[in-house]
């Protein structure tokens, strides 16, 4: 089975965090980019309780990006300041090279 290597995360309701991928067990280095058409900020991270918010997340404005190492993509949560904002996630390097 081929492993998914890229994801889009849409925060339907601002202030309600969305898990990047509940199904993905892959870990590695991920590039996270705020959609260039976003009108507000997105917040990425994990607060230790399966959530992220504007007070606990790493803020990205439209078009900004961050690189993050995660044991599994399911640990990444995304929230936003405006309804419908998006984040793009790309697996750059997997901890387990057999997923390529």
Image (tube, helix red, strand yellow):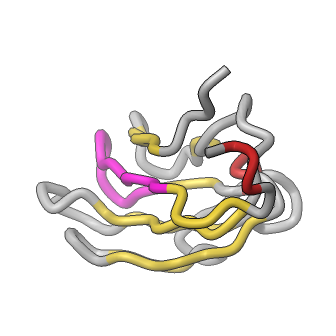
Q: State yes or no: residue 85 in magenta.
A: yes
The picture places residue 90, in percent across and down from the top left corner, at: 46, 55
What residue is rendered at 83% in x and 62% in y?
71
The residue at the far left in this view is: 37
What residue is rendered at 60% in x and 27% in y?
2
- Residue 16, picture quadrant: top right
The picture places residue 65, in percent across and down from the top left corner, at: 36, 76
Quadrant that contains the N terminus: top right
- Residue 19, picture quadrant: top right
Q: Residue 71 vs residue 58: left or right? A: right
Above or below — where is 87 with respect to 83? Answer: below
Q: State yes or no: residue 21 in magenta.
A: no
The residue at the far top in this view is: 1
What residue is rendered at 59% in x and 44% in y?
20
Above or below — where is 45 with respect to 79? Answer: below
Q: Nearer the viewer, residue 29 or 85?
A: 29
- Residue 89, picture quadrant: bottom left
Quadrant that contains the C terminus: top right
Helix, strand or loop: magenta stretch: strand
Q: Residue 91 vs residue 38: left or right? A: right
Above or below — where is 27 with respect to 65? Answer: above
What residue is rendered at 58% in x and 42% in y?
18
The picture places residue 24, in percent across and down from the top left corner, at: 72, 36
Q: Residue 35 vs residue 4: left or right? A: left
Magenta range is 80-90
């Amino acid at each position: 089975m081929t492993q998914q290597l890229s994801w889009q995360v849409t925060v339907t309701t601002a202030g309600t965090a969305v898990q990047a991928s509940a199904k993905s067990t892959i870990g590695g280095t991920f590039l996270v980019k705020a959609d260039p058409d976003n009108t507000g900020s997105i917040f990425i991270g994990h607060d230790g309780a399966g959530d992220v918010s504007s007070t606990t997340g790493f803020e990205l404005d439209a078009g900004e990006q961050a690189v993050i190492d995660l044991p599994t993509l399911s640990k990444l949560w995304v929230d936003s300041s405006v309804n419908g904002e998006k984040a793009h996630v790309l697996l750059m390097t997997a901890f387990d090279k057999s997923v390529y």
